[in-house]
Amino acid sequence: MSDLLGIGASGLRAYSRALATVGDNIANAQTPGYARRTLQLGEALGAGDTPFVRANVSPGGVTIKGLSRSVDAWLNADARISSGDAERAGTKLAWLDRVETALSDETNGIKTGLTKVFTTADELTADPSNRTLRSQFLQAVDDVASGFRTAAGQLSDMADGISDAATSAVDQFNADLNALEQINVGLRKARPGSTGEATLLDERDRLIDQLSAQGGVTASFDDRGAATLRATASGDILVGGGVVTPVTATTAADGRVSFSLAGGAPFTTATGSLAGLAEASNHVADQRAALDTMASDFAGQLNAAHQAGTDADGNPGAALFTGTGSAATLTAVPLTADQVAAADASGANGNMLAFGAMRGANDPESKWAGHMASQSQATASARAQDAAATTRADAAAAARGTVSEVDLDREAADLMRFQQAYSAAARTIQVARETMQALLSAI
């Protein structure tokens, strides 16, 4: 009877724990990073038996071997890589969309202003003494200068925004590195197969997922599950051996963002949101330089053209722009209508005719249109990359989910199975009790 009681008691303990595990799975079905848990049960050998002699093994009940998590290391690694690629593409696209908006005609009016400058110049060829047209010409010049300043200001603010975002991202990255080291400490102390260990492993995987989405990292694990994290590109250790190596962000004078490890070694990553921010900062810096070049070239062309003519009083034409060194400082000179140099030696409208002749393959209008086309193409390419990377990441996450996520139908079936097993174990104890009472009553 003692064997029967022992078998029933072991069943109660095992199936009670199994029911609790199923309950944890159901309760955490929607918890991000939670991996389905399974209680590993095995046959307990009867008293007096040894692992070397099984001929006389008698039933000994159920023993709990530990708790296992439903994970696939390859699927985890694949999901992390694809997540990093998706974060890089998404971060870059978000900033390129803003650049396109900053350079659009709806925001700065540069395209409209350039067209108006040449359109008004064409109208002045027919009526060079018209003061209204002269004033419109000067207003168009001022609109173009204002548009360049607006675009330069928005790109400058964007560069500052990327720098701030990089600093915040690095702070979060370092906080996650420190948290991962604390998880490593906990895993080295946790009892193997326990619920506590499983919870720590879930948090470890969640942190590595997040770090992979932020920057290129590669993880390896020891026999207790503690992680060693390395920079994928260089192999430098970020977390390992009780040491955490933080990352810092540096912003150059032109707004380009770069990252380095403590000690000065570069932290180069081609994936994750940090890579997206670095690429976006490079693009914005290139756009700012190109905008300055176009503003300077445009101002130089129009200044030279206007100064080649004479105004209404017969004086040489004045410069139309000052501050031609950059788009941010480009300013229209406050001229009067009479100071518009519409004439030249050939006639009263000769200089305006020369203005019209500037329009062509290399005029400011076509240069600006070409620049906007290049920006649109870059944004479209980034959008295509983002769509492909997102689809890839979703597929990888779904593949991992088929292994790790909780299936409520399966849990419901396990719940019924373990409830019946628990009832059977309880009935075993009851039968042993009734048999013992019957034997005692017969004495």
Image (tube, rainbow, N blue to C red):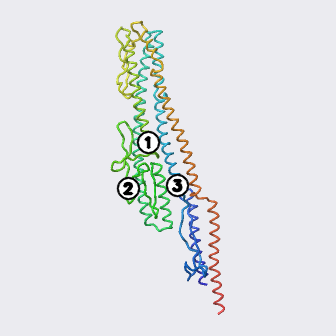
Could you tell me how far apart the alpha carbons at marks 2 and 3 are, in whole angstroms?
23 Å
Front label number (1 vs 3):
3
Instruction: Give the residue number, with chain letter if any, for mark 1.
Output: 277
Q: Is residue 143 left or right of residue 383?
A: left
**Amino acid of disc 1:** Leu
Q: Nearer the viewer, residue 143 or 90?
A: 90
Residue at screen point 55% across, 63% down: 37
Q: Which of 401 and 263 is in front in this view?
A: 263
Expressed as whole percent of the image width and height from the top left, the position of residue 139 reads 43, 19
Residue at screen point 41% across, 30% down: 290
Instruction: Give the residue number, with chain letter if any, for mark 3.
Output: 76
Expressed as whole percent of the image width and height from the top left, the position of residue 72 reads 54, 58
Instruction: Give the residue number, with chain letter if any, for mark 2.
Output: 244
Could you tell me how far apart the alpha carbons at marks 1 and 3 are, in whole angstroms?
25 Å
Q: Is residue 93 left or right of residue 343?
A: right
Expressed as whole percent of the image width and height from the top left, the position of residue 303 reads 38, 18
Residue at screen point 43% across, 9% down: 350
- Mark 1 vs mark 2: which is more N-terminal? 2
**Amino acid of disc 2:** Val
- Mark 2 vs mark 3: which is more N-terminal? 3
- Quadrant for residue 6, please give it: bottom right
**The residue tagged with tag 3: helix, strand or loop?**
helix
**The residue tagged with tag 2: helix, strand or loop?**
strand
**The residue tagged with tag 1: helix, strand or loop?**
helix
Expressed as whole percent of the image width and height from the top left, the position of residue 183 reads 44, 60
How would you rate the neighbour count of disc 1 (Cα within 10 Å): few for under 14, some for 14-19, many for 20 or more? many
Query: How many badges with numbers are in the image?
Result: 3
**Amino acid of disc 3:** Asn
How would you rate the neighbour count of disc 2 (Cα within 10 Å): few for under 14, some for 14-19, many for 20 or more? some
